[in-house]
Amino acid sequence: MAGNSEPLSPRAKLAVTAGKAAAAVSRAAGRGSGSVIGGKVALRLDPELLGRLARHLDVILVSATNGKTTTTRLIAEALRAAGPVVSNALGANMPAGITSALAGGSDARYGVIEVDEKYLAGVARDTEPKAIALLNLSRDQLDRAAETRMLAEKWREGLSGTKAVVIANADDPLIVWAASSSPNVVWVAAGQEWKDDAWSCPSCGGVLQRPGDDWVCGDCGFRRPVPTWALNGDYVLDPHGSAWPIHLQLPGRANKANAATSAAVAATFGVPPQVALERMYQVQAVAGRYDVVTFQERQLRLLLAKNPAGWLETFSLIDPPPTPVILSVNARGADGTDTSWLWDVDYTRLAGHPICVIGDRKLDLAVRLEVAGLDFRVCQTVDEAVQIAPPGRIEAIANYTAFQDLRRRVGN
C-alpha cells in the first residue's frame, strides 16, 4: 500500500487551485470537461506536480491501442473493493489530463490511470506505478503515432528494470517484446483478433509462425510465453487453474479479454477474482460507449471504433443484418488527419446491412465502401441518416471526434 499523503507544497497547492479554476472556466464556456486545460495550467505552474500528486497512491497504468478506457474503468471498479480510487475515467490520457484527474484524488488509495501509448514511459517515470497493464499494439493515427515496432521498442526501453508488476497480453508479440525487459511480468492469454501488425518477429524481423493459438519465430526462437491467467470462453482461468465466470453488461469478446486482464491486475492488489468480476458487472457503458439512446423515436447504440483493430472488434458485436448501420468518420487532430487506415478495414463484413455514411470524411469512407462492393447512402447529418434508416435498432459506429459529435447531437 502506498504511504500516507504528504502535504503539498504551497507551489503545488497553487498549481492545483489554478488548474481547477481553469477547468471550471472551460466547462462554463461549454468547451468540455476542462481536464486538459486545467492540467496544462497546473503543470505550467509546477512541472513536477504529476509526481507529487501520485506520491501517496498505489498507481496502476493502463496502455494499449484499443481497450484502455474500458479496462481502466473495469480495474477501477474492481479495486474499489479494497479502497477509494481516483481515475481519469473520461479518457484524458496525456500528462495534462492525468494531472487533472489525480488532483481530485487526495483521499484515494489507488490511482488507476489510462495512458496514451506515446506517453507511457514518461508517465511511468513520474508516477512510479505499482502495476502496468499492457493490452495490445496495432496501427493507429498514422500521421502522429510511431510505427508499431518502434513504439514497442520505446516501451521496452522505458520499462526496462521497472519495479512495477507488468500485466501483459501473451498473445500479442509486440506486447511480449515490450514487456520482456521488465523483471516481473504476469502473462495473460487475452487473445489477439487483429494480427496484421504482428506477422514479423519484433526481436529479429523474421516471420512469425502461428500454430493454433501459439506463435514463435523460426529464426531467433522468440516465442509466446506461458500465461498464468487466461480468457477461456466465458471464464477467467487464474494461476491455480480455477475458472471464474465473466458476467458483463458490456458486449463482445474484447471486453471479456479486458475483464480477464483486469482480474489479473486486481489480484496483484489482493482482490480475489470472484469479487473483482462481480464488481465489473456494474459497468454498463464507458464514456458513452455501448450506450443505447433514443433519438427521433429510434434507438441507437453508440459504438466507438478508432482504427482497423477496433473496427474489426466492433463488427463482431453488432446485431446481424438487416440491422441498419450508421458509419461516421472524422479526421481532426485528435483522430489523426490521415485516413488511409480505412483501406485496412474489412468493410465487407457489413454486407447485408443498410448503411448510411456521415462525418467530415464521409466521402473518403464512401469510396472505401464502394470499392468493397457495398450498398450505402451518403447523408449530411445523423438526423437525415436516422430518418432514412429501415426499422430496428441502429448501430452507430464512429471514430473518436465523430463519436463525440454523435453523442452531443443525440443528447448522450
Image (spheres, rainbow, N blue to C red):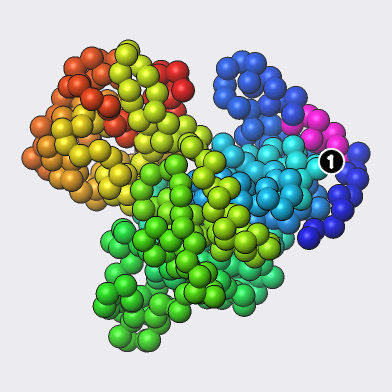
Instruction: Locate the N terminus and report the quarter of the image it occupies.
Output: bottom right
Total marks in image:
1
Give the left or right position of residue 196, taking residue 129 as reference.
left
Indicate the amino acid at tag 1.
Ala
Residue 353 placement (x, y as % from top left)? 16, 34
Using the rendered view, name the quadrant where residue 98 is placed. top right
Which residue is painted at 74% across and 31% down in the image? 19
Label 1: which secondary element: helix
Residue bearing the label numbered 1: 12
* Frontmost residue, 364 versus 254: 254
Which residue is painted at 39% across and 80% down in the image? 223
Q: Is residue 267 above or below residue 183?
A: above
Residue bounds of the magenta highlight: 11-19
Residue 296 placement (x, y as % from top left)? 32, 13
Local packing at callout 1 (Cα closer than 10 Å; few below 14, some 14-19, many 20+) is many
Give the left or right position of residue 78, taking residue 374 as reference.
right
Residue 120 placement (x, y as % from top left)? 58, 56
Which SS type dominates the magenta stretch? helix
